[in-house]
Amino acid sequence: MSCREKNRIRQAAGSALFLAGLILLLSFTSYLVLPKNNLEAFGMTDVTANGILGEPDDSIDVLVLGDSEAFCHISPMEMWQRQGFTSYVCGTSSQYLYWSDTFLRQAFQNQKPKVVILETNAIYRDLSRKDTLVNRLENWFPVFRYHNRWKSIRSGGFLSPVEYTWTDDYKGFAYNNTVDPAVSTDHMTPTEEAASIQPLNQWMVHSMARFCQENGAVFLLVSTPSTLNWNYAKHNGVQQLADTLGVSYIDMNLMTQEIPIDWSTDTRDKGDHLNYAGAVKVSSWLGQYLQEQYQLPDHRQDEAYARWNQALERYRNGVGASS
């Protein structure tokens, strides 16, 4: 073996050792700053969406992902009350698809949902390659996401075990009973035009669909009613994407008989989002559809799910007191 070859081997070995050391360092520091509970006081971000971390392992039947259209329009407790299966909305305001993907993969670390729903409004929110890569890096090494936490962690908190304890009684749903009628309701005027979907967005949805298939879950695209965010061209674009993926697509904006949204009473902000009355209509239909199509279990009499019945009481008192 020549001296040059020996030098190359030494350099390669040195680079490998350096990379391994860097990965170990990043992994260790990531654990130190990782929130040890899923409450804001522990540094957790998007606390409501991360409430799923406090749910018992393998207890969620349906996972919902998306932006405010998801957490304003789909109420897991309404579906629990009627059908008895469990669901959770991991929705955040203006959610980008890389965040949808993050919540998806995070949920599957402890849950095995049978159905995963992606609310489609996020599909038309443009992504940047830089932000998508940064998000992946933060997922691998949380120290990049929580690097400022060291300033507020109390003594002993760095090495505390991770124990997520908080759960949301509303399971990710954001209750609002404000009434502010829509100005226009002709958003679904038929057209042959198909709104284009950015290639990176298409790739992200493909990745999520593939992940669900590999993990035994049905991937379902759903457009919830919105006069400001949806139209027929977007419907056509998502339908084409769904056909390419071979997945089902439900556009509730076209289901005026099955989901009779009254745009004079069922929206809280001129057709942008539904209020509680509109969310009840969406959740009532969706719950029945999911149970019938995917034979989801009814846990209401199961003692292991007693906490859901207790949460339902608090939910009903909360929405009843505000109505």
Image (cartoon, rainbow, N blue to C red):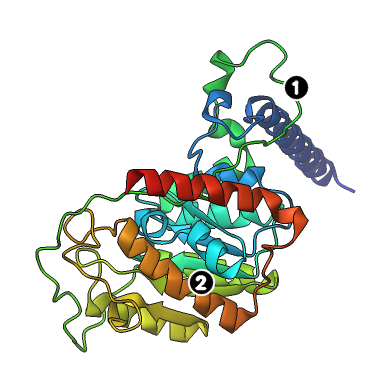
Which one is in front, 149 or 141? Answer: 149
- At 65% from the left edge and 59% from the top edge, which residue is drawn? 60
Which one is in front, 317 or 174? Answer: 317
Where residue 297 sits, quadrant-wise, is bottom right
* Residue identified by numbered label 1: 159
| Labels 1 & 2 near each other (Cβ < 8 A) | no
Q: Tell me the amino acid under the disc marked 2.
A: Gly
* Residue identified by numbered label 2: 287
Where residue 31 sits, quadrant-wise, is top right
Question: Looking at the image, is mark 1 or mark 2 nearer the viewer?
Answer: 2
> Circle 1: is it few (<14), some (14-19), or many (20+) Cα within 10 Å?
few
- At 54% from the left edge and 62% from the top edge, which residue is drawn? 81
Q: Which of marks 1 and 2 is nearer the N terminus?
A: 1
Q: Distance between the residues labelled 1 and 2?
A: 42 Å
| Residue 173 at least partly seen | yes
Q: Farthest bottom residue?
A: 192
- At 75% from the left edge and 61% from the top edge, which residue is drawn? 302
| Percent of width and height locating residue 82 | 53, 68
- At 59% from the left edge and 70% from the top edge, which residue is drawn? 115
Q: Tell me the amino acid under the disc marked 1.
A: Leu
Position of residue 3 in the picture relative to residue 113 (left or right): right
Q: Farthest left residue?
A: 183
